[in-house]
Image: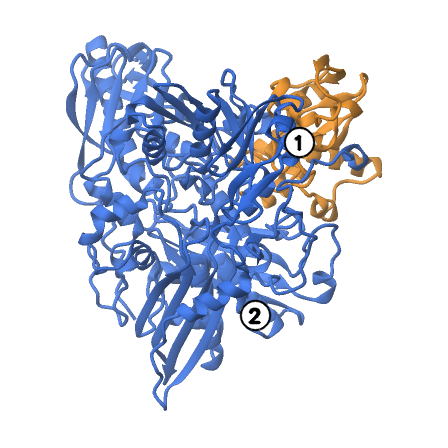
Amino acid sequence: MEPPSARRGQEPAAAGPGRRRFLGYVLAASTLTVAAELGEAVLAPDEAEAVVPSVPGPAEIYDLNDMLTHATLPTANLITIRIDAAGTASFALPRSEVGQGITTSSAMLIAEELDLPLERVRVTLADARPELLFNQLTGGSNTTISTFTPIRVAAAVARGRLLKAASLELGEAVDTLTAKAGVITSSATGRSLTYGELARKAAAVTTGRVSVGLKEAAEFKVIGTPQGRVDAIDAVTGRKKFAMDLHVPDALPAMVCRPPTINGTVRSVENLAEVRAMPGVTDVVTVSTGVAVRGRTFGQCIDAVRALKVSWGPGSAEGASDSTIRDELRRAEPPLPAVGLLTKSVDARFTFHFASNSALETNCAIADVRQDSAEIWGSLKSPIVTQEQIASKLGLPVSAVTVHVTEGGGSFGRKLFHDAAAEAAEISKATGKPVKLMWHRTDDFRQGRTHPMATSRVRATYALGQVLTYDQRHTSVATDFGHGVGEIITSEAARLPVGDLTFSETIFALSQQTPYNFGVVTQLLSEVDKGFNTGSMRNIYSPNVRCAQELVVDELAGRMGKDPYRFRREFAKDERVRAVLDKVAAVGNWGRSMTAGTAQGIALHPEYHACVAVLAEIDCRPQTTGRKVRDAYTGPRVTKVVCAVDVGLAVNPQGLQAQMMGGIMDGIAITLSSGLHLDDGHFLEGSWDNYFYTRQWNAPPELEIVVMPPTTGQPGGAGELAVGAAAAAVACAYGRATGTMPTSFPINHAGPLGFEPLPTTPPIPASPTDGLNRAF
Amino acid sequence: MPEQTFILNGKRVTVDIEDDVRLLWVLRDVLGVTGPKYGCGLGVCKACTSHINGKAFNPCSVPVGAVGPDDAITTIEGLPATVGKDLHPMQEAWLEHDVAQCGYCQPGQIMTAVAKVRQAREEGREITEADLDEIRNVCRCGTYHRIREAIVAGAKKY
């Protein structure tokens, strides 16, 4: 139906005649230190040739990742690799590791190009580097896309220098030498030198530019092989250090007594002196977000927060509830185009409730604010924005604020923002002491950022076996992009074919794709209400927008008398999409006979120069939905998931499978069980037994993830990729098992509340005391 | 201030702190043992799971005063020593299955897994799918499937 289209331009960079050259640097240093520019012209996307029945949407020509990659071009600075006398390569990655495995994949790139064993590569996280400007944002599943070439270039420069140094040292020509596993050996004499022995000799007195070639894909020995995480041993032994595990002198625990409604403000505190005198408490101060308590232990901070008697002013969403926001969204929904009298159409409206992007590690940061300087520690995906905004708030020059990026206990969108770091800095300044600030779990759900509530209206028209038009109007509570993506757009938006859209509308246009030939396709975003603390949640719009679209696809297939898989296959725009679809259908035995109340669902999702298909099987029979687990939501069970993923080139297939697995668990949660109930200006959920993220009793017992062979030769994004397809496949399976297309998510949201809400005053509950009774 | 004494990872420790402070904070904030993580402080998420006299429990939900001088507390840091090795077989299984993503919940997951296997064996059987379904530990990265695989494999190692 279509020549291999938009992706054709992304052939492996080195495929042409002669090996492509890249520029790197050797830096003046006492030991071999090499560098490359982050952000590289080779990553520039080719323009697509629009010869498909549907005109490609902006996201197909130039998507969010292209923008993130391009934004780095004019401002990129150097990333450096250092080889020490022990033969170890060290690299400070200017990105945030929050579980997605980028320290491992970055180490693999270095090991590959440097011919050094993986365990001899040490990747740490760089402090905020303001000179990198836009280029220290971890988001949009962009890390591997934007660093794949620069990291390899730097490693190749190092390898070349080491070979040259060995040649001088041994008195033999470079072409008689081979580098392997950190040792350079002469094929003529058999003499050898280790990288460690050569590290000083290979060092440069002056900084200079070097031209290097990179390995061809056929030469890869590390890239594309399954590797365990480089930090796995630290994780399983408890040695991995997160922000709250760091010891910073005198940084005592601190917590904040927060308002009963979203963003309420402190009017007055009745019993400051009394709380200051409580055991362990050192300080109690009013800050912009509530009343902060500093003490010897977090346990004593919890007690002090609970003891505070605070009079609160109204918040930013006073009186709001799910139903008032639903009404507000409906009023703001733009109209859909009229349908001709003789045209058949599918019309649907979907509602997606607020959801929490809270990680298991709650918002937290350490701050040590002095008279003329400040030091911050935290898991931060936009550390430069953090540094600049904290400096401005403290009235310090940016250079006086040091921001250390720590390992993160999950992010899911949360750590794009620096709410805890800003708050910690404010408390440290107010108390004049270092603080280790941590949010309570209950606050993290109730006052922390959320994925905004939204509706999606869809109208698709069809005739004579073709889909003629597809219109989608996504109306959402505003998403906060204040973490720095906005700055990128400021500089980039003018270059894009998106006209004078707002920031959010631009992000929407750049991230939303319809992977099917559905004639004239129009997808638009409208936003309302800025009263909520929002952000992205392992994707911004895709899980909702694509879930709605895939449900409509099932409906269209049904109306047109076609099988859901074959319908998708027939209308798919892209061969890569068709290949992953075929793979899950074959591996998952699509169409197999299933008992009443159980069904399969199939869906796909293209984004981040990658695509994924998911086949899910669900069990909605009463004996399953009626399972009893204490303080839990059981509901329908996804019994099996098969996923096929094509990221162009998987640097670490095992890490990629892990990312798909996580995305699938998220997709199951947002479709079936995990949402926030907004009631009278606050969210009801306050613990993991209220907010029903996937637990073991919801997890699919059978899971298979197929990594497709390399296609484009360039890595695409993976971190967020699976969520939309998994959410949609589960929704489609649910629709087929129950005979009714679900239209409100999560599916359990409308049912009776599955828990007794915690009080809002005091804002956080006391820790239990009966833990020994539950020991097993 | 009251004196609290108990056995931590094989060594007797004494701490000056009020009786009602939950053990998690005594471990983390006073003793600097940071393997057990805070995920809720409500006995729900299980990120702090450790062992008391060999049984899994949540130190966030136990006042330090309730722990006696002869009670043996084992955190993830002390788990390998309970089998006299550098790594417990369950930790090895975790590495072989590359379970961890962010890793924040994994110390608690491993401590729960070891207790679950022990509990099943005390009932004269090996771990089952139903046992795995009972595990309450939250993993927000969604590593549930690899956790299940690692527990089954780990149980076969000892």
| Chain identifier matching the blue colour in the rendered picture | A
> Alpha carbon of mark 2 to alpha carbon of mark 1: how far?
47 Å
Query: Looking at numbered disc 2 in the image, what kind of residue is underneath it?
Result: Gly
Residue B139 visible from this viewpoint: no
Q: According to the image, label 2 marks what residue?
A: A735
Q: Point out the frontmost of discs 2 and 1.
A: 1
Q: Residue at x 20, y 62 (%)?
A: A49
Disc 1 residue type (three-letter) = Asp
Q: Position of residue A540 (x, y in %)?
A: 41, 53
Q: Is residue A492 left or right of residue B109?
A: left
A529 relative position to B10: left or right: left
Where B50 falls versus A601 (above or below)?
A: above
Q: Chain of mark 2?
A: A
Tag 2 and tag 1 share a subunit:
yes
Residue B2 vertical position relative to residue A299 in the rendered view, above or below: above
Identify the residue under disc 1.
Answer: A303
Given the image, what chain letter belongs to the residue carrying mark 1?
A: A
Mark linked to residue A127: none
Q: Which chain is orange?
A: B
Q: Secondary structure at mark 2?
A: helix
Q: Residues within 10 Å of mark 1 (few under 14, many from 20)?
A: many
Quadrant of the frame with the N terminus of chain A: bottom left
**Is A666 left or right of A540, judged from the image as shown?**
right
Task: Report x, y in % for residue A339.
Answer: 36, 84
Does residue A38 appear in this view? Answer: yes
Asked whether A558 or A457 is in front, the reply is A457
x and y percentages locating residue A129 in the rendered image: 30, 28
The residue lying furthest to the right in this view is B123
Q: Quadrant of residue A130?
A: top left
Q: Quadrant of residue A621?
A: bottom right
